[in-house]
Amino acid sequence: MHLRDVPLGKRLIAMAFVLTFLPMLVLTLLGGFVFAGINYLGSGWERWAIELWPKTAPIAVHFALERIRDVADRDTFNLHEMEEQCWLLEGSGISVLVRQDGKDIYCSEGAEAAVIEAATMAKTGAGRSALVWDDSGFAYTYRTVHSGHTGQNAESIEVYAAGDTPLKQSPLSQAQREVQREGRLILYTVFGAGLLVALLLGVAFARLLTQQVLRPLAAMRQSAAAIKHGDYDVPAIPAGTQVQDDEIGATCQSFDDMRRGLKAAREERERYERNRKELLAGISHDLRTPLTALRGYASGILDGIARTEEKRTHYVTQIYRSSTILQHLVEDLFLFSKLDLGRVEFDCATVDLRAYFADFVAERAPWYEDQGLVLHLDAGGAARLPVRLDPQEVLRVVENILGNSRKYGGEQPSVDISIGEEAGAYGKRAVVRFADHGPGVPEAELGKLFESFYRTDKARSQTAKGSGLGLAIARGIIEGMGGTIHAETTSGGGLTVVVAFPILETEPHGEDRKEDLE
Protein backbone atom coordinates (compact mmCIF):
# COMPACT_ATOMS: atom_id res chain seq x y z
CA MET A 1 0.00 0.00 0.00
CA HIS A 2 1.45 3.37 -1.06
CA LEU A 3 1.07 6.74 0.64
CA ARG A 4 -1.06 7.99 -2.28
CA ASP A 5 -3.57 5.21 -1.55
CA VAL A 6 -4.29 6.66 1.92
CA PRO A 7 -7.36 8.94 1.99
CA LEU A 8 -6.50 12.63 1.89
CA GLY A 9 -8.22 13.38 5.20
CA LYS A 10 -6.04 10.92 7.05
CA ARG A 11 -2.93 12.22 5.28
CA LEU A 12 -3.72 15.80 6.28
CA ILE A 13 -4.22 14.72 9.90
CA ALA A 14 -0.94 12.82 9.77
CA MET A 15 0.85 15.84 8.25
CA ALA A 16 -0.54 18.16 10.92
CA PHE A 17 0.54 15.75 13.61
CA VAL A 18 4.01 15.42 12.13
CA LEU A 19 4.50 19.15 11.62
CA THR A 20 3.28 19.92 15.15
CA PHE A 21 4.58 17.11 17.31
CA LEU A 22 7.51 15.67 15.42
CA PRO A 23 10.05 18.30 16.57
CA MET A 24 8.95 17.81 20.17
CA LEU A 25 9.08 14.05 19.79
CA VAL A 26 12.55 14.14 18.23
CA LEU A 27 13.93 16.38 20.95
CA THR A 28 12.33 14.28 23.68
CA LEU A 29 13.77 11.08 22.24
CA LEU A 30 17.21 12.63 21.84
CA GLY A 31 17.12 13.93 25.38
CA GLY A 32 16.03 10.53 26.64
CA PHE A 33 18.81 8.81 24.72
CA VAL A 34 21.38 11.28 26.06
CA PHE A 35 20.42 10.83 29.69
CA ALA A 36 19.98 7.08 29.26
CA GLY A 37 23.47 6.90 27.79
CA ILE A 38 24.90 9.00 30.62
CA ASN A 39 23.18 6.81 33.17
CA TYR A 40 24.46 3.68 31.47
CA LEU A 41 28.04 4.87 31.10
CA GLY A 42 28.49 6.63 34.47
CA SER A 43 27.05 6.95 37.91
CA GLY A 44 23.77 8.56 36.94
CA TRP A 45 22.71 11.63 35.08
CA GLU A 46 23.01 13.80 38.18
CA ARG A 47 26.77 13.41 38.26
CA TRP A 48 27.12 14.37 34.62
CA ALA A 49 24.81 17.30 35.15
CA ILE A 50 27.00 18.56 37.98
CA GLU A 51 30.07 18.28 35.73
CA LEU A 52 28.39 20.24 32.95
CA TRP A 53 26.48 22.72 35.09
CA PRO A 54 28.15 23.04 38.54
CA LYS A 55 25.44 25.39 39.81
CA THR A 56 23.13 22.40 39.94
CA ALA A 57 25.33 20.62 42.50
CA PRO A 58 23.29 21.58 45.65
CA ILE A 59 20.12 20.42 43.96
CA ALA A 60 21.75 17.16 42.90
CA VAL A 61 23.12 16.57 46.42
CA HIS A 62 19.72 17.09 48.04
CA PHE A 63 18.17 14.84 45.44
CA ALA A 64 20.73 12.11 46.21
CA LEU A 65 20.05 12.42 49.95
CA GLU A 66 16.34 11.94 49.39
CA ARG A 67 17.05 8.84 47.31
CA ILE A 68 19.34 7.49 50.08
CA ARG A 69 16.61 7.94 52.67
CA ASP A 70 14.09 6.25 50.36
CA VAL A 71 16.34 3.23 49.80
CA ALA A 72 17.16 2.99 53.51
CA ASP A 73 13.47 3.07 54.52
CA ARG A 74 12.42 0.24 52.19
CA ASP A 75 11.54 -3.14 53.67
CA THR A 76 13.92 -4.76 51.19
CA PHE A 77 17.27 -3.03 51.26
CA ASN A 78 19.13 -2.72 47.92
CA LEU A 79 22.78 -1.80 48.29
CA HIS A 80 23.25 -1.22 44.53
CA GLU A 81 20.71 1.61 44.47
CA MET A 82 22.37 3.08 47.54
CA GLU A 83 25.77 2.93 45.84
CA GLU A 84 24.60 5.01 42.86
CA GLN A 85 23.65 7.88 45.17
CA CYS A 86 26.88 7.49 47.12
CA TRP A 87 28.84 7.89 43.89
CA LEU A 88 26.98 11.09 43.22
CA LEU A 89 27.90 12.49 46.64
CA GLU A 90 31.49 11.41 46.12
CA GLY A 91 31.47 13.36 42.82
CA SER A 92 30.77 16.45 44.90
CA GLY A 93 33.67 15.73 47.31
CA ILE A 94 31.62 14.00 50.04
CA SER A 95 32.69 10.69 51.61
CA VAL A 96 29.98 8.17 52.55
CA LEU A 97 29.75 5.32 55.07
CA VAL A 98 26.86 2.82 55.15
CA ARG A 99 26.31 0.26 57.93
CA GLN A 100 23.83 -2.54 58.21
CA ASP A 101 23.22 -4.02 61.67
CA GLY A 102 26.51 -2.43 62.85
CA LYS A 103 28.52 -3.85 59.96
CA ASP A 104 30.20 -1.56 57.41
CA ILE A 105 28.83 -2.54 53.98
CA TYR A 106 30.00 0.51 52.03
CA CYS A 107 32.75 3.08 52.50
CA SER A 108 34.06 5.64 50.00
CA GLU A 109 37.33 4.65 48.41
CA GLY A 110 40.35 6.19 50.14
CA ALA A 111 38.38 7.11 53.25
CA GLU A 112 38.26 5.52 56.74
CA ALA A 113 34.92 4.59 58.29
CA ALA A 114 35.88 5.92 61.75
CA VAL A 115 36.97 9.26 60.32
CA ILE A 116 33.71 9.66 58.36
CA GLU A 117 31.62 8.74 61.41
CA ALA A 118 33.57 11.09 63.74
CA ALA A 119 33.37 14.02 61.29
CA THR A 120 29.66 13.51 60.85
CA MET A 121 28.88 13.13 64.56
CA ALA A 122 30.90 16.24 65.34
CA LYS A 123 28.56 18.35 63.25
CA THR A 124 25.18 16.56 63.48
CA GLY A 125 25.28 14.97 66.93
CA ALA A 126 23.69 11.63 67.78
CA GLY A 127 20.25 12.32 66.36
CA ARG A 128 18.38 9.93 64.03
CA SER A 129 18.52 12.30 61.06
CA ALA A 130 20.44 15.50 60.61
CA LEU A 131 21.98 17.61 57.84
CA VAL A 132 24.50 20.40 58.31
CA TRP A 133 25.86 22.16 55.22
CA ASP A 134 27.62 25.48 55.53
CA ASP A 135 30.74 27.16 54.28
CA SER A 136 32.88 24.99 56.59
CA GLY A 137 31.72 21.73 55.05
CA PHE A 138 29.02 19.09 54.75
CA ALA A 139 27.75 16.52 57.28
CA TYR A 140 24.77 14.17 57.09
CA THR A 141 23.56 11.30 59.23
CA TYR A 142 20.54 9.05 58.93
CA ARG A 143 19.52 5.98 60.93
CA THR A 144 16.56 3.68 60.43
CA VAL A 145 15.30 0.45 61.94
CA HIS A 146 12.81 -1.71 59.98
CA SER A 147 11.71 -5.32 59.73
CA GLY A 148 13.38 -7.61 57.20
CA HIS A 149 11.66 -9.08 54.22
CA THR A 150 10.47 -12.02 56.32
CA GLY A 151 8.86 -9.68 58.87
CA GLN A 152 10.71 -11.40 61.76
CA ASN A 153 14.27 -9.97 61.94
CA ALA A 154 14.86 -6.27 62.69
CA GLU A 155 17.49 -4.54 60.57
CA SER A 156 19.20 -1.20 61.19
CA ILE A 157 20.64 1.00 58.43
CA GLU A 158 23.06 3.82 59.29
CA VAL A 159 24.31 6.39 56.75
CA TYR A 160 27.13 8.84 57.49
CA ALA A 161 28.34 11.43 54.96
CA ALA A 162 30.95 14.14 55.51
CA GLY A 163 33.14 16.36 53.39
CA ASP A 164 34.88 19.69 53.10
CA THR A 165 32.53 20.77 50.28
CA PRO A 166 31.36 24.30 51.08
CA LEU A 167 27.82 25.38 50.35
CA LYS A 168 29.17 28.19 48.17
CA GLN A 169 30.70 26.83 44.96
CA SER A 170 34.36 27.54 44.38
CA PRO A 171 35.65 28.59 40.94
CA LEU A 172 36.04 25.76 38.40
CA SER A 173 39.42 24.35 37.64
CA GLN A 174 40.85 24.21 34.11
CA ALA A 175 40.03 20.48 33.83
CA GLN A 176 36.47 21.07 35.00
CA ARG A 177 35.99 23.86 32.51
CA GLU A 178 37.31 21.63 29.69
CA VAL A 179 34.92 18.83 30.64
CA GLN A 180 32.10 21.33 30.88
CA ARG A 181 32.87 22.78 27.43
CA GLU A 182 33.14 19.40 25.69
CA GLY A 183 30.00 18.06 27.33
CA ARG A 184 27.94 21.08 26.44
CA LEU A 185 29.27 20.96 22.85
CA ILE A 186 28.12 17.36 22.54
CA LEU A 187 24.68 18.14 23.91
CA TYR A 188 24.24 21.20 21.70
CA THR A 189 25.36 19.20 18.67
CA VAL A 190 22.88 16.42 19.40
CA PHE A 191 19.99 18.79 19.95
CA GLY A 192 20.96 20.84 16.89
CA ALA A 193 20.97 17.67 14.77
CA GLY A 194 17.54 16.83 16.18
CA LEU A 195 16.20 20.24 15.23
CA LEU A 196 17.69 19.88 11.72
CA VAL A 197 16.07 16.48 11.24
CA ALA A 198 12.73 17.85 12.42
CA LEU A 199 13.09 20.82 10.06
CA LEU A 200 13.93 18.60 7.07
CA LEU A 201 10.99 16.33 7.80
CA GLY A 202 8.73 19.35 8.07
CA VAL A 203 9.96 20.68 4.73
CA ALA A 204 9.47 17.25 3.12
CA PHE A 205 5.92 17.00 4.37
CA ALA A 206 5.17 20.58 3.36
CA ARG A 207 6.46 19.82 -0.14
CA LEU A 208 4.35 16.68 -0.25
CA LEU A 209 1.32 18.69 0.83
CA THR A 210 2.03 21.26 -1.89
CA GLN A 211 2.43 18.65 -4.62
CA GLN A 212 -0.58 16.54 -3.69
CA VAL A 213 -3.05 19.20 -2.55
CA LEU A 214 -2.13 22.81 -3.37
CA ARG A 215 -0.84 22.34 -6.93
CA PRO A 216 -3.81 20.24 -8.10
CA LEU A 217 -6.19 22.75 -6.55
CA ALA A 218 -4.33 25.64 -8.23
CA ALA A 219 -4.51 23.88 -11.61
CA MET A 220 -8.22 23.22 -11.12
CA ARG A 221 -8.77 26.87 -10.17
CA GLN A 222 -6.97 28.03 -13.33
CA SER A 223 -9.04 25.64 -15.42
CA ALA A 224 -12.26 26.92 -13.81
CA ALA A 225 -11.25 30.53 -14.50
CA ALA A 226 -10.54 29.65 -18.13
CA ILE A 227 -13.91 27.88 -18.48
CA LYS A 228 -15.60 30.96 -17.06
CA HIS A 229 -14.20 32.96 -20.00
CA GLY A 230 -15.13 30.28 -22.54
CA ASP A 231 -11.73 28.61 -22.84
CA TYR A 232 -12.06 24.83 -22.47
CA ASP A 233 -8.47 24.02 -23.42
CA VAL A 234 -6.85 24.62 -20.00
CA PRO A 235 -6.67 21.18 -18.31
CA ALA A 236 -7.38 20.70 -14.62
CA ILE A 237 -4.60 18.10 -14.63
CA PRO A 238 -1.39 19.57 -16.14
CA ALA A 239 0.43 17.45 -18.68
CA GLY A 240 2.84 14.99 -17.10
CA THR A 241 1.14 15.17 -13.70
CA GLN A 242 0.28 11.86 -12.08
CA VAL A 243 -3.19 11.88 -10.58
CA GLN A 244 -3.22 10.61 -7.00
CA ASP A 245 -5.81 8.04 -6.03
CA ASP A 246 -7.38 10.20 -3.34
CA GLU A 247 -10.14 12.73 -2.87
CA ILE A 248 -8.18 15.57 -4.50
CA GLY A 249 -7.12 13.39 -7.44
CA ALA A 250 -10.65 12.11 -7.94
CA THR A 251 -12.02 15.66 -7.79
CA CYS A 252 -9.47 16.95 -10.31
CA GLN A 253 -10.13 14.00 -12.60
CA SER A 254 -13.90 14.53 -12.41
CA PHE A 255 -13.44 18.26 -13.04
CA ASP A 256 -11.23 17.55 -16.06
CA ASP A 257 -13.77 15.03 -17.36
CA MET A 258 -16.41 17.72 -16.98
CA ARG A 259 -14.18 20.19 -18.86
CA ARG A 260 -13.70 17.74 -21.72
CA GLY A 261 -17.43 17.04 -21.73
CA LEU A 262 -18.21 20.75 -21.90
CA LYS A 263 -15.68 21.17 -24.68
CA ALA A 264 -17.16 18.24 -26.61
CA ALA A 265 -20.68 19.60 -26.04
CA ARG A 266 -19.65 23.01 -27.32
CA GLU A 267 -17.99 21.50 -30.38
CA GLU A 268 -21.06 19.36 -30.96
CA ARG A 269 -23.30 22.39 -30.58
CA GLU A 270 -21.12 24.35 -32.99
CA ARG A 271 -21.20 21.44 -35.43
CA TYR A 272 -24.99 21.25 -35.20
CA GLU A 273 -25.23 25.00 -35.66
CA ARG A 274 -22.91 24.81 -38.66
CA ASN A 275 -24.90 21.90 -40.09
CA ARG A 276 -28.15 23.77 -39.47
CA LYS A 277 -26.88 26.77 -41.39
CA GLU A 278 -25.61 24.54 -44.19
CA LEU A 279 -28.93 22.71 -44.18
CA LEU A 280 -30.88 25.95 -44.48
CA ALA A 281 -28.55 27.20 -47.19
CA GLY A 282 -28.83 23.90 -49.05
CA ILE A 283 -32.60 23.79 -48.78
CA SER A 284 -32.88 27.38 -49.95
CA HIS A 285 -30.63 26.75 -52.93
CA ASP A 286 -32.10 23.41 -53.93
CA LEU A 287 -35.67 24.66 -53.65
CA ARG A 288 -34.90 27.84 -55.58
CA THR A 289 -33.78 26.01 -58.74
CA PRO A 290 -36.92 23.89 -59.39
CA LEU A 291 -39.21 26.67 -58.15
CA THR A 292 -37.60 29.09 -60.60
CA ALA A 293 -38.10 26.56 -63.38
CA LEU A 294 -41.73 26.00 -62.39
CA ARG A 295 -42.40 29.71 -62.34
CA GLY A 296 -40.64 30.29 -65.65
CA TYR A 297 -42.42 27.54 -67.57
CA ALA A 298 -45.78 28.37 -66.01
CA SER A 299 -45.29 32.03 -66.92
CA GLY A 300 -44.43 30.98 -70.46
CA ILE A 301 -47.68 29.13 -70.77
CA LEU A 302 -49.72 31.95 -69.22
CA ASP A 303 -48.03 34.61 -71.33
CA GLY A 304 -48.70 32.65 -74.53
CA ILE A 305 -45.06 32.02 -75.32
CA ALA A 306 -45.81 28.31 -75.78
CA ARG A 307 -48.02 28.78 -78.80
CA THR A 308 -47.59 25.39 -80.42
CA GLU A 309 -48.74 22.08 -79.00
CA GLU A 310 -45.20 20.77 -79.07
CA LYS A 311 -43.92 23.74 -77.06
CA ARG A 312 -46.76 23.49 -74.55
CA THR A 313 -46.02 19.79 -74.11
CA HIS A 314 -42.36 20.61 -73.52
CA TYR A 315 -43.23 23.26 -70.93
CA VAL A 316 -45.63 20.94 -69.11
CA THR A 317 -43.01 18.18 -69.11
CA GLN A 318 -40.46 20.52 -67.54
CA ILE A 319 -43.00 21.61 -64.94
CA TYR A 320 -43.66 17.96 -64.10
CA ARG A 321 -39.91 17.22 -63.78
CA SER A 322 -39.36 20.23 -61.53
CA SER A 323 -42.30 19.26 -59.32
CA THR A 324 -40.93 15.72 -59.12
CA ILE A 325 -37.58 17.09 -57.98
CA LEU A 326 -39.38 19.16 -55.34
CA GLN A 327 -41.36 16.14 -54.21
CA HIS A 328 -38.22 13.99 -53.81
CA LEU A 329 -36.46 16.80 -52.00
CA VAL A 330 -39.32 17.29 -49.55
CA GLU A 331 -39.59 13.52 -48.96
CA ASP A 332 -35.85 13.29 -48.32
CA LEU A 333 -36.02 16.24 -45.95
CA PHE A 334 -38.90 14.67 -44.07
CA LEU A 335 -37.13 11.31 -43.76
CA PHE A 336 -33.85 12.98 -42.76
CA SER A 337 -35.64 14.97 -40.04
CA LYS A 338 -37.31 11.82 -38.69
CA LEU A 339 -33.98 9.98 -38.63
CA ASP A 340 -32.28 12.91 -36.91
CA LEU A 341 -35.02 12.94 -34.24
CA GLY A 342 -34.94 9.14 -33.87
CA ARG A 343 -38.59 8.75 -34.89
CA VAL A 344 -38.14 6.15 -37.63
CA GLU A 345 -39.38 2.71 -36.62
CA PHE A 346 -37.51 -0.15 -38.25
CA ASP A 347 -39.18 -3.48 -39.01
CA CYS A 348 -36.07 -5.56 -38.37
CA ALA A 349 -35.76 -9.28 -39.01
CA THR A 350 -32.99 -11.86 -39.25
CA VAL A 351 -31.67 -11.98 -42.81
CA ASP A 352 -28.90 -13.97 -44.50
CA LEU A 353 -26.89 -11.13 -46.05
CA ARG A 354 -25.47 -13.30 -48.86
CA ALA A 355 -28.91 -14.54 -49.90
CA TYR A 356 -30.31 -11.02 -49.61
CA PHE A 357 -27.85 -9.53 -52.11
CA ALA A 358 -27.93 -12.58 -54.37
CA ASP A 359 -31.67 -12.08 -54.76
CA PHE A 360 -31.23 -8.33 -55.18
CA VAL A 361 -28.64 -8.62 -57.97
CA ALA A 362 -30.56 -11.38 -59.73
CA GLU A 363 -33.72 -9.24 -59.72
CA ARG A 364 -32.39 -5.71 -60.27
CA ALA A 365 -29.17 -6.16 -62.30
CA PRO A 366 -31.00 -6.15 -65.68
CA TRP A 367 -32.83 -2.93 -64.83
CA TYR A 368 -29.61 -1.20 -63.73
CA GLU A 369 -27.86 -2.44 -66.88
CA ASP A 370 -30.60 -0.77 -68.94
CA GLN A 371 -29.80 2.42 -66.97
CA GLY A 372 -26.13 2.08 -67.88
CA LEU A 373 -24.81 0.59 -64.62
CA VAL A 374 -23.27 -2.89 -64.53
CA LEU A 375 -23.41 -4.89 -61.29
CA HIS A 376 -20.98 -7.64 -60.25
CA LEU A 377 -21.55 -9.74 -57.14
CA ASP A 378 -18.87 -11.61 -55.17
CA ALA A 379 -20.76 -13.41 -52.37
CA GLY A 380 -17.50 -14.53 -50.76
CA GLY A 381 -18.63 -18.06 -49.84
CA ALA A 382 -21.68 -20.17 -49.17
CA ALA A 383 -21.83 -19.88 -45.36
CA ARG A 384 -24.76 -17.97 -43.91
CA LEU A 385 -24.22 -14.46 -42.58
CA PRO A 386 -27.23 -13.87 -40.31
CA VAL A 387 -27.73 -10.21 -39.46
CA ARG A 388 -30.52 -8.09 -38.03
CA LEU A 389 -31.90 -5.44 -40.40
CA ASP A 390 -34.97 -3.92 -42.03
CA PRO A 391 -34.96 -5.25 -45.65
CA GLN A 392 -36.98 -2.35 -47.08
CA GLU A 393 -34.86 0.35 -45.47
CA VAL A 394 -31.62 -1.39 -46.49
CA LEU A 395 -33.03 -1.57 -50.02
CA ARG A 396 -33.44 2.21 -49.91
CA VAL A 397 -29.77 2.57 -48.88
CA VAL A 398 -28.54 0.20 -51.60
CA GLU A 399 -30.54 1.98 -54.31
CA ASN A 400 -29.14 5.31 -53.13
CA ILE A 401 -25.54 4.04 -53.26
CA LEU A 402 -26.02 2.48 -56.69
CA GLY A 403 -27.80 5.60 -57.91
CA ASN A 404 -24.78 7.72 -56.95
CA SER A 405 -22.47 5.31 -58.71
CA ARG A 406 -24.63 5.52 -61.85
CA LYS A 407 -24.57 9.34 -61.77
CA TYR A 408 -20.90 9.85 -60.89
CA GLY A 409 -19.28 6.59 -62.07
CA GLY A 410 -17.88 7.86 -65.35
CA GLU A 411 -18.70 6.95 -68.94
CA GLN A 412 -19.15 3.21 -68.32
CA PRO A 413 -20.14 2.95 -64.67
CA SER A 414 -19.98 -0.37 -62.88
CA VAL A 415 -20.18 -1.47 -59.25
CA ASP A 416 -18.51 -4.49 -57.67
CA ILE A 417 -20.55 -5.75 -54.69
CA SER A 418 -18.48 -7.98 -52.40
CA ILE A 419 -19.66 -9.66 -49.20
CA GLY A 420 -17.38 -10.96 -46.47
CA GLU A 421 -16.83 -11.48 -42.78
CA GLU A 422 -14.45 -9.47 -40.59
CA ALA A 423 -13.48 -9.40 -36.92
CA GLY A 424 -14.48 -6.17 -35.22
CA ALA A 425 -13.89 -4.65 -31.79
CA TYR A 426 -17.24 -6.02 -30.57
CA GLY A 427 -17.36 -9.35 -32.43
CA LYS A 428 -17.67 -10.56 -35.99
CA ARG A 429 -19.24 -8.34 -38.64
CA ALA A 430 -20.80 -8.99 -42.03
CA VAL A 431 -19.33 -6.42 -44.45
CA VAL A 432 -20.72 -5.34 -47.83
CA ARG A 433 -18.55 -3.22 -50.14
CA PHE A 434 -19.92 -1.23 -53.09
CA ALA A 435 -16.88 -0.33 -55.20
CA ASP A 436 -17.20 1.80 -58.34
CA HIS A 437 -14.44 2.84 -60.71
CA GLY A 438 -15.32 6.44 -61.39
CA PRO A 439 -13.30 9.58 -60.65
CA GLY A 440 -13.74 9.03 -56.91
CA VAL A 441 -13.55 11.60 -54.14
CA PRO A 442 -10.41 13.24 -52.65
CA GLU A 443 -9.19 11.57 -49.46
CA ALA A 444 -9.89 14.67 -47.38
CA GLU A 445 -13.53 14.71 -48.57
CA LEU A 446 -14.39 11.08 -47.73
CA GLY A 447 -15.57 11.84 -44.21
CA LYS A 448 -17.88 14.62 -45.45
CA LEU A 449 -19.83 12.43 -47.89
CA PHE A 450 -22.35 11.48 -45.21
CA GLU A 451 -23.05 15.05 -44.11
CA SER A 452 -26.37 16.59 -45.06
CA PHE A 453 -26.44 18.48 -48.37
CA TYR A 454 -22.82 17.67 -49.10
CA ARG A 455 -21.88 17.54 -52.77
CA THR A 456 -18.56 17.40 -54.53
CA ASP A 457 -20.18 19.98 -56.81
CA LYS A 458 -19.38 23.02 -54.64
CA ALA A 459 -21.52 25.30 -56.78
CA ARG A 460 -24.52 22.97 -56.29
CA SER A 461 -25.36 23.42 -59.96
CA GLN A 462 -26.40 19.79 -60.53
CA THR A 463 -29.57 19.82 -58.47
CA ALA A 464 -31.25 17.35 -60.78
CA LYS A 465 -28.69 14.70 -59.84
CA GLY A 466 -29.82 14.63 -56.23
CA SER A 467 -30.61 16.55 -53.09
CA GLY A 468 -27.35 15.87 -51.30
CA LEU A 469 -29.23 14.08 -48.52
CA GLY A 470 -28.96 10.54 -49.88
CA LEU A 471 -25.83 9.39 -48.03
CA ALA A 472 -26.81 11.32 -44.89
CA ILE A 473 -30.09 9.39 -44.91
CA ALA A 474 -28.20 6.16 -45.60
CA ARG A 475 -26.01 6.72 -42.56
CA GLY A 476 -29.05 7.44 -40.38
CA ILE A 477 -30.75 4.23 -41.53
CA ILE A 478 -27.71 1.97 -41.14
CA GLU A 479 -26.68 3.37 -37.76
CA GLY A 480 -30.31 3.24 -36.61
CA MET A 481 -30.21 -0.54 -37.14
CA GLY A 482 -26.93 -0.93 -35.25
CA GLY A 483 -24.65 -1.02 -38.31
CA THR A 484 -21.87 1.21 -39.61
CA ILE A 485 -21.21 2.90 -42.95
CA HIS A 486 -18.17 4.74 -44.29
CA ALA A 487 -16.38 5.52 -47.55
CA GLU A 488 -12.98 4.44 -48.84
CA THR A 489 -10.96 4.96 -51.98
CA THR A 490 -11.25 2.07 -54.45
CA SER A 491 -7.96 0.41 -55.32
CA GLY A 492 -7.11 1.66 -58.79
CA GLY A 493 -9.42 4.67 -58.52
CA GLY A 494 -13.03 5.22 -57.61
CA LEU A 495 -15.17 5.22 -54.49
CA THR A 496 -16.07 2.32 -52.19
CA VAL A 497 -18.94 2.55 -49.72
CA VAL A 498 -18.60 0.00 -46.88
CA VAL A 499 -21.66 -1.17 -44.90
CA ALA A 500 -21.27 -3.52 -41.91
CA PHE A 501 -23.68 -5.30 -39.55
CA PRO A 502 -22.96 -7.41 -36.46
CA ILE A 503 -23.30 -11.13 -37.16
CA LEU A 504 -25.82 -12.86 -34.91
CA GLU A 505 -24.33 -15.63 -32.78
CA THR A 506 -27.62 -17.56 -32.70
CA GLU A 507 -30.45 -17.22 -35.17
CA PRO A 508 -34.09 -16.95 -34.10
CA HIS A 509 -36.63 -19.22 -35.74
CA GLY A 510 -40.14 -18.81 -37.00
CA GLU A 511 -41.72 -15.65 -38.31
CA ASP A 512 -38.77 -13.47 -37.30
CA ARG A 513 -36.57 -14.90 -40.10
CA LYS A 514 -36.66 -13.40 -43.58
CA GLU A 515 -34.56 -14.87 -46.36
CA ASP A 516 -35.65 -12.95 -49.45
CA LEU A 517 -36.59 -9.48 -50.54
CA GLU A 518 -40.17 -8.60 -49.84
Image (cartoon, rainbow, N blue to C red):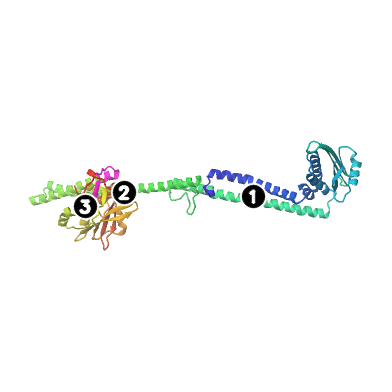
Q: Is residue 3 left or right of residue 30?
A: left
Q: What residue did someone put label 2 on?
A: 275
Q: N-terminal of the two: label 1 or label 3?
A: 1
Look at label 2 and name its amino acid: Asn
**Rounded to the nearest whole Å, what is the CA distance between mark 2 and mark 1?**
65 Å
* Mark 2 residue element: helix
Q: Quadrant of residue 62?
A: top right
- Determine whether, in the image, residue 440 is placed left or right of residue 156: left
Residue type highlighted by circle 3: Ala
Stretch of the chain drawn in magenta: 336-353
Q: Report whether 245 appears left or right of 286.
A: right
74 or 3: which is nearer to us?
74
Label drawn at residue 355: 3
Mark on residue 198? 1
Residue 332 place in picture, x, y as percent: 23, 47
Residue 229 can be seen in this image: no
Q: Disc 2 or disc 1, which is closer to the eye?
A: 1
3D distance between C-alphas at marks 3 and 2: 38 Å
Q: Which mark is residue 97?
A: none
First in residue order: circle 2 vs circle 1: 1
